[in-house]
Each structure stands twice: as structure tokens, then as C-alpha cells.
Image: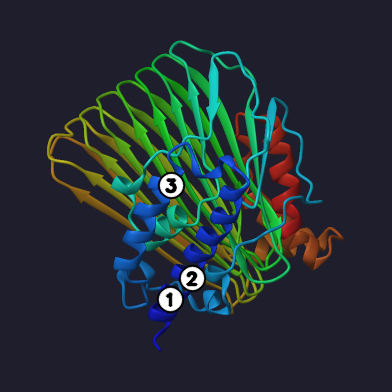
């Protein structure tokens, strides 16, 4: 049997396993089947049965293999309900999700409502993994910030995926910041073991809203993560999204931003590090669908030993998007001859009245700088670490949240 067929069979088995689990819970009058979850799961299962899992012949999966999933992650569900995994304190309000299960009590923030409502994201689903996520949802979380609300402290979502054997955990987040609101949300993915975190996040920024969004991925190297992030911006909204990640057995991030109304502004910054035999693949697409919108992306990647990093950044200027201003930069650093970085920036422009720029570089560590540090009594390993941190420090220092910036410097420095 071909790998795509095998994975599809295992994914459908995982959905059937959840059905059985829910049937047992229904006998005990469990609430998990309510709040629209049943309809989302049913739709996901139907779509999953019709989809084909990609192989490396598919252009967007050319550099990423799904062989790691053949161990059975898709057909088993992570069942731990507690965890000893620790997470840093970034201040504000904290909510912990363990293997796709929400806590019994949701937080209370003035002007913000939390619910277990499952929002149908099928219209924006671009991959078979979005449908798998829907088909295997135990719970979903919807967060709505009221019109004109200013939330001073961040909301820290700690998302734990943990299992002792190959299994998966599905997480679905839907965040709405209404007109003229201000909100900061931190998605922090942690966990251990051979666990696949299947995540989908949709973020809606209303007119003249201001949203800071952090996506931190610090699971252990043996874990896996396949995630979808969609951002929808309305008139004069401002979104700053920060993507920080260490590679693991398999990490894939599909990010798509829709600039739906004029005046929308996007700032996106990213750091990804692949060491040893780990893998990370970022697929970013910015849709300039309305006039006079601006987007500014800077991503930096580092790969060492036999690590592999992939970055594909696409800017799509629609016919009516006059006055668009879009920039994309991806700079990468190779630490060894055995490492690999595949970078492809793309521009697709259908309007002449625009300003667009894109570029990518892949280079090695400066031997003269390393020699200089070692000549001052610094060991070779320490010198490489200092140069690696210096390469990404520009982005880390610019993070608005000082607690996140301080944690990220130590975390990413340790990975170098």
C-alpha cells in the first residue's frame, strides 16, 4: 500500500476511535458533543474520506516527507489528562489545554468571552490535515473580544501534547477581536513524546483593531506538529504576528493572511532553528485582496548537523489591490555541510500600482568573526553559539513583550 493510502486509512481509524470515545461519554451525559462540535467533526470526517494525503510529488510538499507519520500517530489519540510539562510565566491570564481537552473552568476577562463553540473553518481549509483536525476534535475554544475593549495583559494559551507512544492531539482555536479593540494572545505549544499536535487557529481582526499574536513552538525534538494559521484583517486593522520555533521530527506550518479591507497593516517576524535530524517547513502566503494595505515579513532560519529547514513565502497582489506595499525577507545560516535549507520567496502581482520587494539569502558562519572570538579565549562552541544568537537577536530584541523576548533568547540560545 502506498504511503498516502496508508496515512488516509490510519486517519479514518483515528476519527472512528474518537467516535467510540464520544459514544461512551454520551452514556455518561458528557458535554463534549455539544457546541457545534458534532457538525464540525462529521464534516471533517466526510472531507477526510475524500481527500488524498500528499507525497513529495506535490509541489508544496516537495521538501517535506510524511514518512514519520507511518508509525501510527494518526490512528491513536493521546489520552493523558494531566501533565508535568512546565511553561514560563508571561504574566496575564493563563489557560492550559492538555491533549485537546479544555479545563473545566474557562478564564474570566472583562470584555472577553470564552466558549467551547466550534467554528467551522472548512472554507479556509487548504490541506487534508485541516480535515483530520476537525474529525478528531475533542474540544474547541472560541475567544471573542468585545468592540472597543482594551485588554492590557496578554492571554497565554499553554497547549500541551504528550504521549508515551505515537498518537495525536487536535487543537482548534478561533479568536475574534472586534472593531477598535486591543488584544495580545500567546499560543505556546509544549509537550513531549512521539505526539503529533494537529492545530488550527483562525484570527479575525476587526476594523481599527490592534492585535499582537505570538506563536511559540517548543515541543521536544521527538514530537511532531502540523498546524494551520489563518488571519483575516478588516479596515485599518493592525496585526503583529511573531512565529518562533524549534524543529522536531516533523514540523509543518501553513500560514495564510487575508487583507480583506483597505488600510490593513501586517507585521510578521519569524525565527526557526533545525538541529541534528529535525525538520521544519514554513509555508506563508499573504493575500493582498484590498487596496492600500501593507505587509512586512522578516524570517530568519538556522540549520546545523543534518537538520533541514524549508521556507516558502508568497505574496499575492489581487487585481483590485492598488497601493499595496509588501516586503518579504528570509535570511538563513548553515552551521554545517550536512544541514539543508530550501528557501523560495514568491511574488504574484496583478496590479501595476504597487510596491513589492522580496529576497532570500543562505550563507555560512563568518570564519573571520569566529576566529576573532576564539583569539580572545572563547571556545569554538561558545563562539558559534554567540554568532548564532547574534544572527537572530535583532528579531528577538524587537519583540514587544519583554517576558517573551527574555525567555526566547535563553530558549533559542540553548538550542544553538
Q: Residues within 10 Å of mark 2 (few under 14, many from 20)?
A: some
Q: Secondary structure beneath disc 1?
A: helix
Residue at image position (65%, 26%) is 107
Q: Quadrant of residue 169?
A: bottom right
Image spot of residue 156 (x, y percent):
65, 34
Residue, x 39% and y 78% (percent of image)?
4
Q: Do labels 1 and 2 touch, CB within 8 Å? A: yes
Report whether residue 262 is seen.
Answer: yes
Name which quarter of the figure residue 297 lies in.
top left
- What is the crowding at mark 1: few (fewer than 14 residues within 10 Å), some, or many (at least 20)? some
| Dot label at residue 38 | 3
348 vs 241: above or below: below
Q: Are marks 3 and 2 in contact (CB under 8 Å)?
A: no
Q: Is residue 47 above or below residue 125?
A: below
* Label ID, residue 13: 2
Q: Position of residue 325 (x, y in %)?
A: 28, 34
Amino acid at each position: 500500500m502506498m504511503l498516502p493510502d496508508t496515512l488516509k486509512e490510519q486517519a479514518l481509524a483515528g476519527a472512528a476511535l474518537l467516535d467510540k470515545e464520544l459514544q461512551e461519554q454520551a452514556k455518561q451525559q458528557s458535554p463534549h458533543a455539544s457546541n457545534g462540535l458534532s457538525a464540525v467533526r462529521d464534516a471533517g470526517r466526510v472531507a477526510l474520506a475524500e481527500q488524498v494525503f500528499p507525497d513529495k510529488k506535490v509541489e508544496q510538499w516537495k521538501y517535506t516527507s510524511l514518512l514519520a507519520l507511518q508509525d501510527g500517530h494518526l490512528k491513536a489519540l493521546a489520552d493523558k489528562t494531566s501533565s508535568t510539562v512546565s511553561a514560563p510565566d508571561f504574566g496575564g491570564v493563563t489557560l492550559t489545554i492538555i491533549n485537546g481537552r479544555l479545563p473545566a473552568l474557562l478564564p474570566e476577562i472583562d470584555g472577553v468571552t470564552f466558549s467551547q463553540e466550534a467554528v467551522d473553518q472548512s472554507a479556509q481549509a487548504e490541506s487534508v490535515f485541516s480535515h483530520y483536525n476537525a474529525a478528531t476534535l475533542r474540544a474547541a475554544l472560541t475567544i471573542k473580544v468585545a468592540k472597543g475593549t482594551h485588554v492590557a495583559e496578554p492571554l497565554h494559551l499553554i497547549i500541551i501534547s504528550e504521549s508515551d507512544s505515537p498518537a495525536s492531539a487536535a487543537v482548534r482555536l478561533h479568536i475574534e477581536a472586534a472593531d477598535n479593540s486591543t488584544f495580545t494572545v500567546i499560543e505556546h505549544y509544549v509537550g513531549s513524546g512521539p505526539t503529533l499536535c494537529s492545530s488550527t487557529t483562525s484570527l479575525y481582526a476587526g476594523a481599527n483593531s490592534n492585535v499582537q499574536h505570538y506563536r511559540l513552538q517548543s515541543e521536544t525534538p521527538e514530537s511532531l506538529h502540523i498546524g494551520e494559521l489563518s488571519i483575516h484583517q478588516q479596515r485599518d486593522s493592525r496585526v503583529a504576528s511573531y512565529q518562533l520555533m524549534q524543529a522536531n521530527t516533523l514540523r509543518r506550518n501553513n500560514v495564510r493572511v487575508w487583507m480583506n479591507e483597505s488600510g490593513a497593516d501586517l507585521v510578521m517576524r519569524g525565527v526557526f532553528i533545525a538541529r541534528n535530524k529535525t525538520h521544519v517547513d514554513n509555508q506563508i502566503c499573504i493575500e493582498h485582496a484590498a487596496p492600500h494595505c501593507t505587509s512586512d515579513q522578516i524570517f530568519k532560519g538556522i540549520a546545523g548537523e543534518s537538520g533541514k529547514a524549508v521556507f516558502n513565502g508568497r505574496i499575492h497582489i489581487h487585481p483590485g489591490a492598488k497601493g499595496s506595499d509588501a516586503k518579504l525577507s528570509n535570511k538563513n545560516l548553515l552551521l554545517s555541510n550536512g544541514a539543508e535549507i530550501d528557501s523560495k520567496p514568491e511574488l504574484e502581482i496583478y496590479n501595476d500600482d504597487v510596491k513589492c520587494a522580496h529576497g532570500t539569502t543562505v550563507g555560512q558562519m563568518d570564519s573571520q568573526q569566529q576566529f576573532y572570538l576564539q583569539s580572545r579565549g572563547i571556545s569554538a562552541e561558545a563562539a558559534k553559539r554567540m554568532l548564532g544568537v547574534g544572527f537572530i537577536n535583532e528579531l528577538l530584541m524587537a519583540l514587544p513583550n519583554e517576558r517573551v523576548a527574555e525567555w526566547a533568547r535563553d530558549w533559542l540560545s540553548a538550542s544553538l
